[in-house]
Image (cartoon, helix red, strand yellow):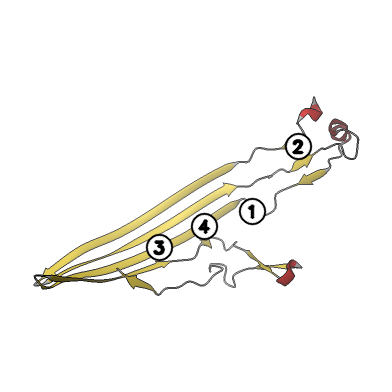
Amino acid sequence: MFSGGIEALSDAQYSFNRNQNNSFGYNSFWNRGRHNVTFGADLRRQQVNVLSQQDARGTFTFTGAAAGSDFAGFLLGAPDTSSIAFGNADKYFRQTHYDAYITDDWRVNGALTLNIGARWEYETPITELYGRLVNLDIAPGFTAVAPVVAGDSKRPLINSDRFGVQPR
């Protein structure tokens, strides 16, 4: 019965996520002569709080490679492989998104109207509330890896572009 498919023992993965989104927006218009100007802005703040960790108490796999059968390995307490989670289970991600726009519908004459506008967007890189973000710097040839940590614990791991202006 044991060799019929029960070869690994592990806990179910516990997961608790709480997402909070706050937003503020403003849109308006101004009409003067041949110009119809619309403008506005948005601010969105996102918080993603995660409490989740796979293999928090470990996984043991019995294949029978060492003891002759998987059940014998289980009775002897000799798993063929084992693993356990590493690191913090709680993560508190933060990100903010800003955007603004302006558009002018300019009626040059009865047959020609120009639509001129610009939009600016800026999305901050994701940060972690307690500065526990890390990335890997993989060496050429994949011979070694080194952790990359932000110098200031509240800073993101990547630089951002605050000059994202495009036509609208």
Nearest the eye: 68 or 124: 68
- Which residue lies most toward the top here? 1
In the rendering, which numbered label is found on residue 93? 4
- Label 1 with label 2: CB-CB less than 8 Å: no
- Label 3 with label 2: CB-CB less than 8 Å: no
The location of residue 21, given as percent across then percent down, is 40, 53
In the rendering, which numbered label is found on residue 8? 2
Q: Residue at the location (32% across, 62% down)?
A: 42
Where is mark 1, residue-wise? 88
Disc 2 residue type?
Answer: Ala
Query: Tag 3's secondary structure?
Result: strand
Q: Which mark is first along the chain, 2 or 4?
A: 2
What's the CA distance linking mark 1 and mark 2?
A: 24 Å
The location of residue 147, given as percent across then percent down, is 68, 67
Give the mark toward the camera: 3 or 1: 3
Q: Which mark is first along the chain, 1 or 4?
A: 1
Q: Residues within 10 Å of mark 1 (few under 14, many from 20)?
A: few
Q: Is residue 85 left or right of residue 79?
A: left
What's the CA distance linking mark 4 and mark 3?
A: 14 Å
Disc 1 residue type?
Answer: Asn
What's the CA distance linking mark 3 and mark 1?
A: 27 Å
Q: Residue at the location (10% across, 72% down)?
A: 34
Where is mark 3, residue-wise? 97
What's the CA distance linking mark 4 and mark 2?
A: 33 Å
Nearest the eye: 91 or 81: 81
Q: Which mark is first along the chain, 2 or 3?
A: 2
- When the figure is inspected, residue 91 is found, relative to residue 78, above or below; the finding is below
Give the mark toward the camera: 1 or 2: 2
